[in-house]
Structure formats: structure tokens, C-alpha cells
Image (cartoon, helix red, strand yellow):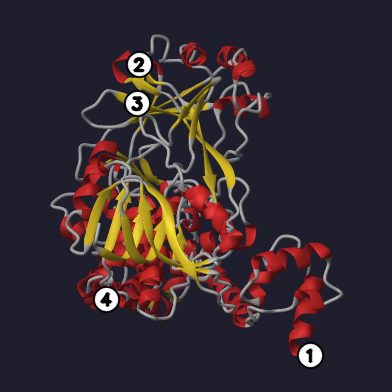
Amino acid sequence: MSKIYDIIVIGAGHAGIEASSAAVKMGLSVGLITLDLNAIGRMSCNPAIGGTAKGHLVREVDALGGVMGFLADKTGIQFKMLNKSKGPAVWSPRCQSDKELYSKAASDYLRTLDGLDIIQDMVKELIVEDYSQTGKYYKYKIKGIKTELGNEIKCSSVIITSGTFLNAIMHTGREQTSGGRFGEKSATGLSECLMKLGFETGRLKTGTPPRLQMDSIDFSKTEIQPGDKEPVPFSHRTPFELERFPNQEQVNCHLTHTNENTHNILRTGFKDSPLFTGIIKGVGPRYCPSIEDKISRFSDKPRHQIFLEPETLDGNTVYMNGFSSSLPSEIQLKAARTIPGLENVEMIRQGYAVEYDFFPTHQIDLTLETKLVSGLFNAGQVNGTSGYEEAAGQGIAAGINAALRLKNEEPFILKRSEAYIGVLIDDLIIKCPDEPYRMFTSSAEYRLVLRQDNADIRLMQKGFSYGLIEKKYLDLINEKSELIYQGIKYLNTKTISPKNVNTLLIHKNSTPIKQNEFLSPILKRNEVNIKELLSVCDPGDSTLLNKIRGNEDVLNQIEIGIKYDGYIKRQAEQIEHFNKNEGIRIPEDFKYDKINSLSSEARDKLKKIKPLSLGQATRIAGVRPSDISAILIYMRG
């Protein structure tokens, strides 16, 4: 091919979609290379978007101008806000998607982008030239790629988003098949090329459960798991760009459980398990273990949850969530038939494990650019993460940074105090996962500030500045922010009389007031909600109150802002301290060997990771407070 691209993106999964979309919107020409044109945005495992903490990532990607949230809204067949019984910091949106509609919607969207070419081929080799530079440790510079079909394509930057396909092997029992996904081949050659350049690689494992035939399931023996009656969309675009929401027919999921009989049958297959026989060398995700791993590690538990989730509206396949397995297929089926509702079940496809190459993340920086090759970025599961949402967050960050680099503009780096995406990328750099990394709300120190409901307020200005968000949407968010501000100000400065509010308080079993009181302390009472309180406020303030009452999102954020005011202020103080440490920069060529008082573990970790700031250094496992003090003394000395 004679065409020259600014950026080549390798892989059209969730990271590749976001990287390509962002770069094209920023005015760059992009070639997106995929093994299969029909597999764009394919949901390899669970056909769902969002979930605990993952929903935060989707909202953030959307606020930056990404597409995952809108695609989920367009194709979702069940929407649910998780953790509503807990505090707002951990509320997380999730939707069950029609996997075929999602993939089609993703493909259709990409084909609308001017400046993007989608190419079916396999990248076998990177074309680089020698490029020594001390500042960012580069040794080589990207010049292009070579493909399986013999094409050489020139470019200035490459983003690798190849998911679980690099030298991938699928395992079921003692059977091994080359491939990164059922019915799809592995990507070969690229890992070997990168190793020759000097990159370190590792092996990880993920897995997927059986797909069941829906009409062979007796759902009367299971518990119905309905979605929300009034679902909330992921995307800021949805109310304006979809004629209706939800856009698809909504369905129920179902819950059942394993039992001791199930576990005993599964144990009979352990002798053929690739996990237990040592055939699989890669480490799997600790927080999403296979069913055989569950019953081995948690042998005291008499049962485990199994969620039965439809994969499509029109098809007959059900995803057996909670039963990921690489045991022999006959053992999987026999064990499944001991579960209530599945006594006569038929498997459309057995579960299997996938083992694949990844690149330990001490080899990239906070922009996701590699330290060894200038212009080469890694995003998604090649960085050791698991999940569509983690991939999408990295994809949009890599796409923006690759574009900014070619424009000679400052890089896009989100702090841990600004976004879950910032937490994700910072964790990858400083922790270098040796198992698939999964985002949790507990990973974010400032999660009360980084809620899913305020992602648009936190990040949309950044997306707009890169040309990824339309001004009309930014204007709407600015109006919403002002309304939230005015609402909080109103509640903090307006008083209410006993005559107007006591009837409500008595009805809510709350102590009546004896004299006029400000509205905000009354709203802080657990038993009082904002809608009820505003309903008894001064009708003379109806203009402002009507605006507030007419916006559920605004009402929700005002209430959170008032009820959690003390906690939010405390986190703001913590963030200020955090930012001070982040502002103390460590030179790229810092000589750790000259500090004799550093522990040997700290010295090795610091030289390997090369933290950019004192704050980042404090988060590296094995670096003690005394090591940080020694670094500070040396820097000031």
C-alpha cells in the first residue's frame, strides 16, 4: 500500500475503537488494522458494559468524547444502577448489551469517520529506525508496519490495541487451539518483533464460560433479576441523539446457584484442568476466577452464584456468568446440569481459557507511549488489564496522546485526583501488574469526588479542548454546573419556618424544628430527601426551584453536595496535599545509585519505573517513607 497514515491502530476492539475515533476527530489520518472486519467491537466475553467502577470509566470516556457509552445506550437490553443501597461514591451504571447490535453499531460508527480507513490484515512487524534520545529513553522511532499480506504502510505513530490475540492459545481440558477468541486466529509475529527490539513480554490468562441454549433452560426454577424501571443512560448524547431510551426491548436476567453436587463433578475434571496441570503458565484475574478455581480456593462455600444473561434479543444464547471454565467440555456440561433450572440444558459452546502475551507496563509512561520506541503506544489488554471499560479508557488516552505528540502539543495526563482513568494508568505504571488488572472503586482514593454522576462536569472541558466534544454539549454542562452551584447556594443561605417544614418532618419521623433554620442542615438528615424539602420551600423562589426540580441529575448532585459536604471538603484537602507531591518533579536522569541510604528494593523499583514525581514515587510498592525522605534531601542538596 502506498498510502501514508499519521497513526496506525492495531486491533479494532474497545481500545482500538476509542483510539481511532479520538485521533481522527483531532484531525489525524488513521489506518485501523483488524484481523476480521466482522469482529469490530466484538464482546469476547460478557456482553455487558459498565459495572462496579467500570461504569465510572465508561462515563469518563463519554465525557472526553469517546463512544462506548453511546454505543451501550443504543444497544443495551437491560440497564441497572449497581450499589444503590450504598453511598453515591460507589453507585455504578451497568447495562446488558445485545452483542451483535453492539458490534454492528461500533462498525457503523467507525465507517462514518472521515480520515479513517479500516484494513483487514495482520501486523507482523514494526518498521523502526535508530533514534537515540536520553530525555524519554527512546532508542528507536516508528516509521511504519509490515503485514501478513505483504503490505508496508508508513506512519508516524502506532497504537497497539491487540487485546488477547498476541500468540494466543485457547485451552479446554488438555486440548489446545491457536486463537485469541473462539473461531478466530492468533496474531503472530508482532511479539517476536518487539522482543527483538528489546521489549520484555509476559503471559496472562483470561477465560469465558459456556454459552447455553435458551430454550433448554427452565427459568421457573431461577430468580428473576430485572433492570431498573427508570434507567439512566451512560452518554450525555443519548437524550439528544436517540429517539428513545432505552432504544431496545428490555429483558430480564436470572439468578441460580451451584451446589455440592456441581462442585464434586467439577473436581473430577481437575486432573485434566490446564490450570492445575501447569499447562497454562499465564496468571489469571484474581477477582474473576474460573469456577474450578473458586471451588478449589473457597472449598468451604457450599454454592456460588450463576447469572443467566441473554446475549442477544433475537438469538438463543445465554451467557453463564460465574461459570468461567477451561475444564473438559463434557465435565462442564455434566456439572451445569446439576444447577437448578439447567437440568436439561444444552451447551452451544463450551467455556475455555485464553493465554496471551502482554507487555509489562514499566516499559510505558503516563501517556501510554513506550519508553523504548518513539511514537509507539500500548493500550488495553496488552498492558495487562482486563475488561472492555479499562481498554476503552486507555484507548482514548492513547489516541489523544498520539495525536498531541504529532501536533507537538503538551501531553494529556489525568491525575489520580481527576479521574478513574488517571487512577488506572497511574496504577499500571507504578504497580506493573503480574495478573490482569481490574478497576475497583477502592482503587480510587478520592472516589467521593470522582463519582460517575459528575464525570461530565469533571472532564468535558478537556474533551472539548481536543475537539472531541461539541460546544452545544459543553454549554449544557456549564449550565448544569451553574444550576448545581445555585441550588447548593440556595439551600445554604435560605431559611425555612417550623410552620412550613414540620408537617414534613413529622411525617418522616424526624425531629421538628422550633425556629427558622437553614435548609441545608435539614437536608443533611438521612430521612429527608431534596424533592420533599423543595416541595415546602418558599413559592416566591419558583423560577430557580422549577429549574432544579425539572432536572433529576441536578437534584441528585445538589443532594450529594449537601449531605456529603464535610467528606467532600476533607477529600479536597487531601487532593491539595496530593497535588503538592505531584508537583515535586523528579528529573528523568535522576541518579538513584548515588543515594546510599536507599533500600536495595527501592533503588531497583525506582530505576525500573522512573517515577516522574515524588507523589508517584510514594505509591511504588517497596519504596518506604525513609526512601522518599532520602530522595527529597538529595534533590534539595
Residue placed furthest toward the right = 597
Q: Residue 63: x, y in percent?
A: 34, 65
Q: CA distance from mark 1 to mark 2?
A: 72 Å
Mark 3 or mark 4: whose residue is earlier in sequence:
3
Q: In the depicted view, which residue is nearer to us: 322 or 528?
A: 322
Q: Which residue is mark 3?
A: 318
What residue is at 66 percent from the left and 24 percent from the top?
277
Q: Earlier in the sequence, mark 4 or mark 1?
A: 4
Relative height, residue 365 to residue 232 (above, below): below
Residue at (63%, 18%) from the top-left corner? 270
Q: Nearer the viewer, mark 3 or mark 1?
A: 1
- Disc number for residue 637: 1
Judge left or right: residue 454 versus residue 548: right
Q: Residue beneath label 2, please?
A: 217
Structural distance between the alpha carbons of marks 2 and 4: 50 Å
* Residue beneath disc 4: 479
In the image, taking residue 433 as reference, residue 481 lies left or right, namely: left
User: Which residue sits at x=37%, y=53%?
Assistant: 146
C-alpha separation, residue under disc 3 versus residue under disc 4: 43 Å
Q: Earlier in the sequence, mark 1 or mark 2?
A: 2
Q: Label 4, label 1: how many angstroms apart (C-alpha)? A: 50 Å
Q: Answer with mark 3 or mark 1, whichever residue precedes in sequence.
A: 3
Tell me what residue is drawn at x 72 percent, y 63 percent.
605
The residue closer to the viewer here, 181 or 51, is 181
